[in-house]
Amino acid sequence: MGWATGIVVTSSITHATPAAFITYQHLRSMYEEIALDFLNVEVDYLVGGGKHYFDARSLDNRNLIEEMVKKEVIVKSHLDGELADLNISPRNRFLYFAADLEPKQRLAGRTYFPAACEKGLTFLKKRSDKGFFMMIEGSLIDVAAHANFSEIVIDELLEFDKVVGKMLDFAIKDQETLLIVTADHETGGFAIVGENKKGEPEFSFVSKDHTAAMIPVFSYGPGSENFTGVYDNTEINKKMKEVLKINGTTK
């Protein structure tokens, strides 16, 4: 359709969610095989961890970063400085590795996520005059919930909420952008169970795995009325295609 495409995550870019938007492998843990598939899909703007799977591979001796550079992709990493300080031109595809493996949580010093999302909007809008698609994941919300670390869950959620706010500001101003906010599942059975003597909320988990709790879908913009009601989350894919008219026309 000629759209610019982008992915920004707080995990490695070979992790399950970003990989599902780009490629297919038999197991989500096949990080090096997933990394190899990135050479076959021309995503315009990529930000996340996972540099190790591209240039320090055990599967083969290939340096996928060098191969991407030969394809005129601008590749930068945390070794080149903070993403917020880099000048990025939409003339070339852009990839930024925020960590060699998995990025650390915000409480441990991660800073790139909000800037990466805002820069992504500017980059993608300039990259194509036909439109853009960007997938953003606050990946460590799930990771922290698996570990039952309520403080990290809340902090990662608060950062993600600020990012959603920036995206919503853009969509409200633009009036041609559909914003969808959801999750693939709930993790841990995270709940507020009371308050302590200081009046602060107390939290509890029932599991260290995914639960069957229903998850919300929030949407704003053209076609947002298609995302109301109760449905299986695989319907989101179909609803997005309907809104984009992919099945009928590329208009």
Image (spheres, rainbow, N blue to C red):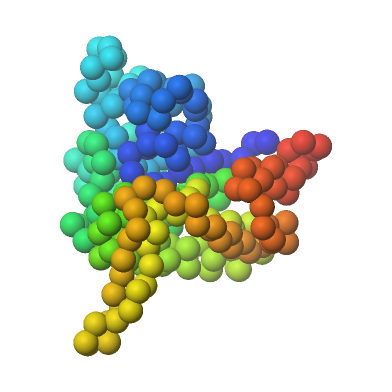
Which of the image's four quarters has the C terminus? top right
Residue 72 seen in the current view: no
Q: What's the residue at 61%, 68% (across, down)?
A: 172
Q: Is residue 165 left or right of residue 217?
A: left
Image spot of residue 123 (x, y percent) = 48, 48
Q: What's the residue at 49%, 25% (across, down)?
A: 24
Q: Residue furthest top?
A: 60
Q: Which quadrant holds residue 54?
A: top left
Q: What's the residue at 36%, 24% (across, down)?
A: 30
Q: Which quadrant holds residue 242?
A: top right
Residue 13 seen in the current view: yes
Q: Which quadrant holds residue 70?
A: top left
Residue 103 drawn above or below residue 218: above
Q: Is residue 239 left or right of residue 31?
A: right
Taking depth in this image into account, of 65 and 211 the one nearest to the observer is 211
Q: Residue furthest right?
A: 248
Q: How many marks?
A: 0
Q: Is residue 220 left or right of residue 161?
A: right
Image spot of residue 13 (x, y percent) = 37, 37
Which of the image's four quarters has the N terminus? top right
Q: What's the residue at 36%, 72% (across, down)?
A: 192
Q: Residue furthest bottom?
A: 198
Image spot of residue 155 (x, y percent) = 30, 65
Taking depth in this image into account, of 215 and 174 the one nearest to the observer is 215
Image spot of residue 16 (x, y percent) = 42, 37
